[in-house]
Amino acid sequence: MINISLKQKCVYLIKVIVFIIIFFGLTKIVAFLCKDDANSYARTLFHEFYEQENIDYLVCGASHVSHGLEANIAGEYFEKNVFNTGTPSQKIDGTYAIIRQASELYNIEKVFLELDFSIACSPAFSERTGFTSEYIVSNGIKDYKIKTDFLLNCSKPKYYLNAFLPIGKDKLMTLNPKKIFGKIKSIITGEYFKYTYKDSDSEYAGKGCVLDLDEIPNGGYCNDKKEKPIPVDDISDDWIHTIENIISFCKEKNIELIFFSMPCSDFYLNERANYDEYYSFCYDFVTKQGFKYYDFNLIKPELLSLEDSDFQDDNHLSKKGVYKWTDFFCDFFSTKYLESNGIEKYFYSSYKEKMNAQEDKIFGLYLIPSSNKQTVEIIPVQNHKTINGITYDIYTIIDNEEVPVAQKTENNIITLPSGKNGKIRVVSYINDNKQNDCIQSFVGF
C-alpha cells in the first residue's frame, strides 16, 4: 500500500488548483476573442445600464420591450430616468435576475413587466435544451450571487459546466475567421469598447431601445404556413412561481409593479385563434395577486389605433410605431387615465368583443403551397368567421415580368407555372374594397 504524505497531497492539490485557474483563464481569453458580440445591442444595453446615475422606472420583458418603448422620450415625459431591459427571447427568470440586479444598484420606483405569451409558454426550466437567451442575460449580470442563482435555477445540473465556463454551446461563439479578425481589429482600434450598435435595418436609440427601420406595407401581411394556437395549458409552474417571486421582491423593496402586454398586429393574434384564452389566464392570475393587468391588444381604437406600417413584423413595432406607442404609453400611465374612475371603459372585455366591434376586414393572407408545389391555396385571416364578397386579383412575377392570372375571382387556388421560379402577388377585396396586397416567392416543380 502506497502512503501519500501530507506534503504530496498539498502539492497535488496546488497543481489541480493551478490547472483550473490556467484552464479557466485560457477559456476566458478564447471566449472573449471568439464571441460574436462586437455588434450586439444587448451588450450595448448592459453597458449603458451600468453607466446610469439612477434608474427610476424599469421596463422589463423580451424583444417586445427593447423594440417598443423609446425610453428617452418616456423619461422626459415622466421626468424620471426610464430604462428598457428587454433582450432577445428573454425568459421570465432572466427578467427576475435583471430586476434584482437593478435594485442592487438603483432606487427603482416602478417596474413595468410585459407579459408576452411566447415567453409565458416557454418550456419549464428543467425542460430547456437551448440557452442562448439565458446566457445573454447572465453575461449582463455583474452581481455574482444573482448570476449564480440564475444559472443554477435556469437548467438541469447536467448543463452547469457549460453554464459557468466562459466558452461553450449557445454562447455566441464563432469560428468564422473573418468575424474573429473583425473583432480583434475592433479591440485593437478601441471600437469594441465604444459599445456602439450598428445595423442597416435598425438603430439604437439609447437606454435599451432599438428602432427598426423596416415596416410592413399596409395590407402586406402574409404567411406560407398556418400558426398554431397559443399553448396556454403549457404555461409552467416555473413561470407562475417566478412571477410570484417578482411580486414578493417588489413588495419587499417597495417597488410599484405594473403588468401589461404590448400591442401586436391583429394578423398575428388572429393567426393564433385563441388569444382570449391567454388574456383570461393572465387577467385571472394577475388580479388574484392584487394587481391590474393592462392588455393593450384590447385597447379601444379611439385611444390607440395602429396600422400595419407601425410594425416591422407581425409582433414588433417599427420606428414609426415605437414613437406612436411611446406617446400613448406615457399619456396612459399618467394621472389622466390611471386616476379616472372605471379604467376598464378604455378596454374591450375580450379580444372577441374587439373583433365583433369592427367592420369586415382581412388582416392578411395565408399563401400555402401544396405538398407537390403545384398549387397555392389562399386563406384570408379575417376578423369575422363569415365574410361575403371576398375576391382576389392574382398575378405571377417571373423574371421581373408581372402577368395577370385572374381578376376579381372567388377561386382561392392558384396553379403555379411548371418549372418556373418566381413570385405570386395576390390582392384581396371585400365587396371591391381593397384589403391586402401580398407577394410571396415560389419554386417551380
Image (cartoon, rainbow, N blue to C red):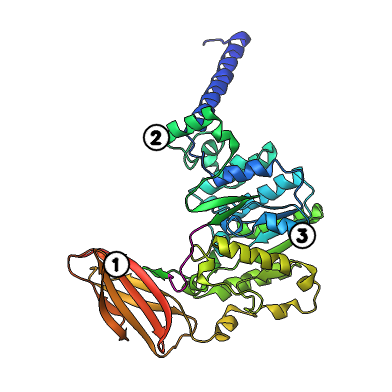
Q: Earlier in the sequence, mark 1 or mark 2?
A: 2
In the image, what residue occupies the spot 64% across and 39% down? 148
Specify whether residue 245 is in view.
Answer: no
Q: Position of residue 445 (x, y in %)?
A: 19, 65
Q: In which image quadrant can residue 152 be found?
A: top right
Q: Position of residue 26 (x, y in %)?
A: 51, 24
Range of the magenta residues?
Answer: 213-221
| Type of amino acid under label 1 | Lys
Query: Relative to residue 293, is residue 116 drawn left or right?
Result: left
In the image, what residue occupies the spot 59% across and 17% down? 13
Residue located beneath label 3 in the image: 78
| Type of amino acid under label 2 | Lys
Looking at the rendered structure, the secondary structure element under dot 2 is helix
Q: Position of residue 260 (x, y in %)?
A: 66, 65
| Type of amino acid under label 3 | Phe
Query: Relative to residue 110, is residue 96 drawn left or right?
Result: left
What's the CA distance linking mark 3 and mark 2?
45 Å
Looking at the rendered structure, the secondary structure element under dot 3 is helix
| Secondary structure, magenta segment, majority class | loop
Residue lying furthest front: 401
- Look at the picture and state if 311 lies above or below 25: below
Q: In which image quadrant can residue 238 be found?
A: bottom right
Residue 218 lies in the magenta stretch: yes
Q: Position of residue 252 (x, y in %)?
A: 80, 53
Residue lying furthest left: 419
What's the CA distance linking mark 1 and mark 3?
48 Å
In the image, what residue occupies the spot 36% across and 68% down? 224
Looking at the rendered structure, the secondary structure element under dot 1 is strand
Residue located beneath label 1 in the image: 423
In the image, what residue occupies the spot 52% across and 10% down? 2
Residue located beneath label 2 in the image: 178
